[in-house]
Image (cartoon, rainbow, N blue to C red):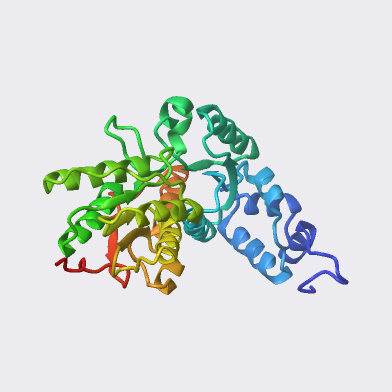
């Protein structure tokens, strides 16, 4: 028998059945993973699949098996590096496990109903499990019992609601703030992220707590929205404050804007102002100066979330997850404050 059908026609189940010497119904049962086929017959069918180069269309596989093998991911509409990096981790594990990934994005600052709509949309597409890559504070109440196969990524709150896959956001703020204080800065200013995100709130609260523990009254928060533009505006504000020698910025992308504004105002980093940020995106090491930052293992988080939801779908025990510890990466943007005469 020829290994492939003649001409340019793609191989079909008929070709597989002919090579294996079985009926097309048997081929369908084997491909669908049904158990009512003798092992030697199933082996012969799979050998014929390989010999003919037959590839089952995903929609056909869904009809045959009653499964879509699709994961859904709900995200906020954003150009943030963290979202794309987490998605890379999710897609890597999904590919290893034979799953496809479909995303649904929700406009920024949306009400809970928008997340419910996105959830329903992915369910209608056939998602067997859904990962929430979004602010999670209101989601358990908004989604109700539909969250059974819905791991969330983010920060756990004091009321017990929150993420299944965690990066310890309070630890991020603590290590960043303590780094500047331990260098000798009298206080630490803070450029916050968007307060819509629980991560921003957690970092701000821990920054305040660390200063309080050291007997320091926290200076006013300088608001940001994750964008370099908001960081630039914050940097102009900081440049006008002579006593601001150390600043904790809630993302690398905002820190780029902060450093640019300080430079334009004639204040050097770290000579006049030390800057520590969060994320450790690829550009952080190549900024001028290279950023001291708190690394978040985004791809690892995505892989953990995907493994967790697939384990739930497949009925196997999911790995127990604990908060992922951040890591301080010390580079050239922080130093001890200049001595005053």
Q: Nearer the viewer, residue 134 or 17?
A: 134
Q: Nearer the viewer, residue 95 or 181?
A: 181
Looking at the rendered image, the quarter that the C terminus falls into is bottom left
In the image, is residue 226 above or below residue 299? above
User: Does residue 247 appear left or right of residue 253 in this picture?
Assistant: left
**Residue 114 occupies which quadrant of the picture?**
top right
Residue 296 visible in rendering: no
Which residue does the image show at 51% across and 35% down from the upper left? 109
Residue 97, given in percent of the width and then of the height, sits at 51, 57
Which residue does the image show at 26% across and 45% down from the upper left? 219
Residue 5 visible in rendering: yes
Which residue does the image show at 35% across and 59% down from the upper left? 277
Looking at the rendered image, the quarter that the N terminus falls into is bottom right
Residue 67, given in percent of the width and then of the height, sits at 60, 43
User: Does residue 105 appear left or right of residue 22 in this picture?
Assistant: left
Residue 51, given in percent of the width and then of the height, sits at 70, 71
In the image, is residue 163 above or below residue 191? above
Which residue does the image show at 28% across and 62% down from the upper left? 327
């Amino acid at each position: 028998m020829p290994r492939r059908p003649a001409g340019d026609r793609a191989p079909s189940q008929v070709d597989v059945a002919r090579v294996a010497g079985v009926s097309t119904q048997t081929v369908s049962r084997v491909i669908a993973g049904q158990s009512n086929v003798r092992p030697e017959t199933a082996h012969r069918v799979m050998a014929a699949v390989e010999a003919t180069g037959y590839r089952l269309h995903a929609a056909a596989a869904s009809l045959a098996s009653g499964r879509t093998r699709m994961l859904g991911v709900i995200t906020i509409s954003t150009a943030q590096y963290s979202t794309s990096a987490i998605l890379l981790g999710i897609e890597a594990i999904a590919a290893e496990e034979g799953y496809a990934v479909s995303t649904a994005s929700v406009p920024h600052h949306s009400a809970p109903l928008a997340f419910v709509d996105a959830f329903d949309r992915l369910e209608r597409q056939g998602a067997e499990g859904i990962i929430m890559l979004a602010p999670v504070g209101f989601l358990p109440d908004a989604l109700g019992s539909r969250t059974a196969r819905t791991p969330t990524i983010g920060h756990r709150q004091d009321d017990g609601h929150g993420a299944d896959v965690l990066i310890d956001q309070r630890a991020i703020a603590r290590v960043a703030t303590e780094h500047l204080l331990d260098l000798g800065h009298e206080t630490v200013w803070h450029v916050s992220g968007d307060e819509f995100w629980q991560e921003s709130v957690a970092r701000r609260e821990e920054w305040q707590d660390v200063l309080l523990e050291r007997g320091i009254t926290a200076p006013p928060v300088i608001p940001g929205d994750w964008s370099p533009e908001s960081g630039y505006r914050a940097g102009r504000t900081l440049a006008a404050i002579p006593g601001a020698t150390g600043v904790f910025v809630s993302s690398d992308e905002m820190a780029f804007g902060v450093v640019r504004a300080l430079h334009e105002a004639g204040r050097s980093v770290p000579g006049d102002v030390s800057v520590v940020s969060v994320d450790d995106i690829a550009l952080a090491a190549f900024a001028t100066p290279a950023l001291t930052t708190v690394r978040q293992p985004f791809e690892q988080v995505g892989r953990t979330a995907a493994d967790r939801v697939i384990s739930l779908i497949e009925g196997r025990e999911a790995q127990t997850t604990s908060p992922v510890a951040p890591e301080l990466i010390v580079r050239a943007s922080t130093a001890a404050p200049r001595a005053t005469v």
